[in-house]
Image: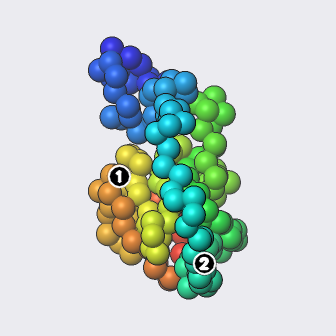
Amino acid sequence: MIKCPFCEAKQVDNTIFCSECGVYLLEDERRGTEALDFDEMDWGDENEEPQAVEVKPENNLQQSIHLKIGDGIREIEASLAKAIHLGRLDPASDVFPEVDLSDESGLEKGVSRRHARIIKRDETVVVEDLGSINGTFVNGKRLAPYLPETLNDGDQLQLGNLVIEIGMG
């Protein structure tokens, strides 16, 4: 048995992700890949002329998201280049979300330390509940934990009792 370094739940040996909190459990040295043998690499035909590739600008793809938190006192523009974790800061538990909701009465409003995350998948932006106690809602619909739900411009995201208005573009 191994113990999750984040939530301390016991897991079966060789488990990759914690069943309680989703943290990656393998040691850092096991994350890498094996190097390819130089002879195994396909370098293509040496005599072949390189083909020009037309690169089209992706102006229509969402690059950031606008979050209007609570009563609109705080507004955040966040990049969708990587996952945006929403929750409450807790240095003692090593929890540092990209969007810390502690100052918006997060504890009193039922926001978990690791409550939800917003990520970009292909051309859509989705939110996932990270197994929070008080739930994540999109336009009043409670989300099942770890199942992505599409976010659209003007949607109302609710973490516990804290409301966040979503803006795209």
The residue drawn where x is 66% and y is 33% is 91
Left or right of 12 in this view: 98: right
Left or right of 151 in this view: 70: right
Task: Identify residue type, mark 2.
Answer: Ala
The residue drawn where x is 34% and y is 22% is 14
Say if 162 sits above or below 41 in the image.
Answer: below
Q: Quadrant of the C terminus?
A: bottom right
Q: Mark 2 or mark 1, which is nearer to you?
A: 2
Task: Label 1, secondary structure: give it.
Answer: loop
Left or right of 13 in this view: 28: right
**How many tags in the picture?**
2
**For residue 142, what is the image quadrant?**
bottom left
Residue situated in front as seen by the camera: 39 or 67? 39
Residue situated in front as seen by the camera: 160 or 22? 22
Task: Identify residue type, mark 1.
Answer: Tyr
The residue beneath circle 2 is: 52
Chain-order first, disc 2 or disc 1: 2
The residue beneath circle 1 is: 146
